[in-house]
Image (spheres, rainbow, N blue to C red):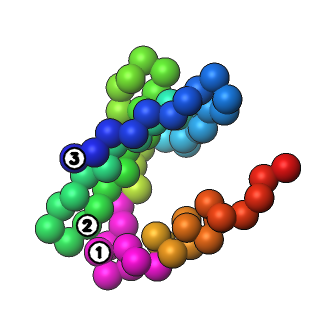
């Protein structure tokens, strides 16, 4: 399990869960047998009431797309 916290002095992410929008200050990534699950953290450092499951068979595709996006220049 890996926890990644964002530098919220620059930008804050967001997450949509069962109870509406939440600020996203980081994420926890769990590695299960066939699934990788991402849980957003709110401003209190708690996991929000939402998650994303990514099947391992599609993980490389997701990584490649995120890498492509990360290389783009943001202005």
| Magenta residues, start to end | 53-61
Q: Earlier in the sequence, mark 3 or mark 2?
A: 3
The residue mark sitting in front, 3 or 1, is 3
- According to the picture, the residue beneath numbered tag 2 turns out to be 35
Identity of the residue drawn at 22% across and 47% down: 1
Q: Position of residue 41 (x, y in %)?
A: 42, 32
Mark 3, Cα crowd under 10 Å, few <14 / some 14-19 / many 20+, is: few
Separation of disc 3 and disc 1 at Cα? 15 Å
CB of mark 2 within 8 Å of CB of mark 1? yes
In the rendered image, which residue does mark 1 sit on? 56
The residue lying toward the viewer, choosing from 45 and 52, is 45
Give residue 1's mark: 3
Give the image quarter of residue 13: top right
Q: Can I make out residue 34 in this image?
A: yes
The answer to which of marks 2 and 1 sits earlier in the sequence is 2
Q: Nearer the viewer, residue 43 or 67?
A: 67
Whether pointer 3 and pointer 1 mark residues with C-beta atoms closer than 8 Å, the reply is: no
Q: Nearer the viewer, residue 7 or 17?
A: 7
């Amino acid at each position: 399990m890996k926890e990644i916290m964002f530098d919220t002095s620059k930008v804050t992410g967001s997450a949509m869960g069962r109870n509406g929008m939440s600020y996203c200050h980081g994420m926890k990534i769990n590695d299960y047998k066939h699934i990788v699950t991402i849980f957003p953290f709110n401003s209190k450092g708690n996991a929000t009431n939402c998650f994303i499951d990514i099947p391992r068979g599609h993980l490389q595709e997701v990584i490649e797309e995120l890498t492509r996006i990360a290389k783009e220049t943001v202005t």
